[in-house]
Amino acid sequence: MLTLSSAPVFLTPYQNSPELPLLVLMPGMDGTGYLWRSQLPQLETWFDVRRLQIPAHNLETWEGLSTQVIHLIQQETLENRQVYICGESFGACLALKLAVRLPNLYHRLILINPASSFSQLPWLGWLGQACQWLPDSLYYLSTLAGLPLLAALEKINPEERQSLLQAMRSVPQTTVAWRIKMLADFQVNPQALWELQQPVLILVGESDRLLPSFREAQRLQKYLPQAHIVTLPHSGHACMLETGVCLSQILQKWLKGQ
């Protein structure tokens, strides 16, 4: 097992609200946890928010990473407290791993453009493995060239575009290659998904150019008995950065409908 890593942490919350349900936000492949910032003011009205940060040199397997995150969540959990786990892209895969490994850990699961379909697109894996051999200058250029695939740039303000680019460039090439391999190898037993009884929200951007997120949401819904799909018209893969997308409003509408 590759273990050139430091343990993941929860970023210091802007405010502590132990009387509210705990909402754990799991990041995309960058692992920084910073790209949730625009969503926090609204979310913290309803939830006690914790943003997971996976250090740039964390090369844990799914098993090792999920063990570390479970330990973090258990440290935050009070008796009878509701726990919501929310993961975006890579983080949604991690959320699924946690869900099947320890179903009693959480009460609701939110998956945003889950990257569990990654293995269906071998060319992405090839590109990811090739990136570790690029000179630094070409690697930096490749992150810029990849932005239109990752996001609907016309819906993201310049500050958020820059934040996305910085987050992408903060991850070493060897770590990118490792996490892409994790996605290519990702598997969850369908029977284990079928046994999950907690409500699940699958949020997808209809214009995701990176992954077939809507098709993957439909596939997951077949195995998750309490799953509900919400689509965001014209939204891309990094939809949480888009102007006009409010995760808090989406969650409140979903919860009221249960």
Image (cartoon, grey):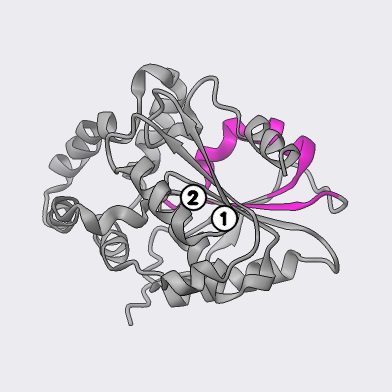
Q: Is residue 70 left or right of residue 117?
A: right
* Residue that appears at 49% across and 63% down: 96
Bin the neighbour count of mark 1 within 10 Å (Cα to Cα): few under 14, some 14-19, many 20 and up.
many
Q: 240 above or below 103?
A: above
Q: Residue furthest right?
A: 19
* Residue that appears at 80% across and 48% down: 16
Image coordinates of residue 221 in percent, x first then y, are 47, 53
N-terminal label among 1 and 2: 2
> Is the C-beta separation of discs 1 and 2 under 8 Å?
yes
Task: State which quadrant residue 239 falls in.
Answer: top left
User: SS class of the residue under badge 2?
Assistant: loop
Q: Is residue 29 visible?
A: no
Question: Residue 26: within the magenta?
Answer: yes
The residue that label 2 is drawn on is: 27
Per the rendered image, the range of residues in magenta is: 20-49
* Residue that appears at 36% across and 57% down: 116
* Residue that appears at 19% across and 52% down: 121
Q: Is residue 59 left or right of residue 248?
A: left
Image coordinates of residue 207 in percent, x first then y, are 34, 29
Q: Is residue 44 left or right of residue 214?
A: right
The residue that label 1 is drawn on is: 52
Amino acid type for the residue under numbered disc 1:
Leu
Amino acid type for the residue under numbered disc 2:
Pro
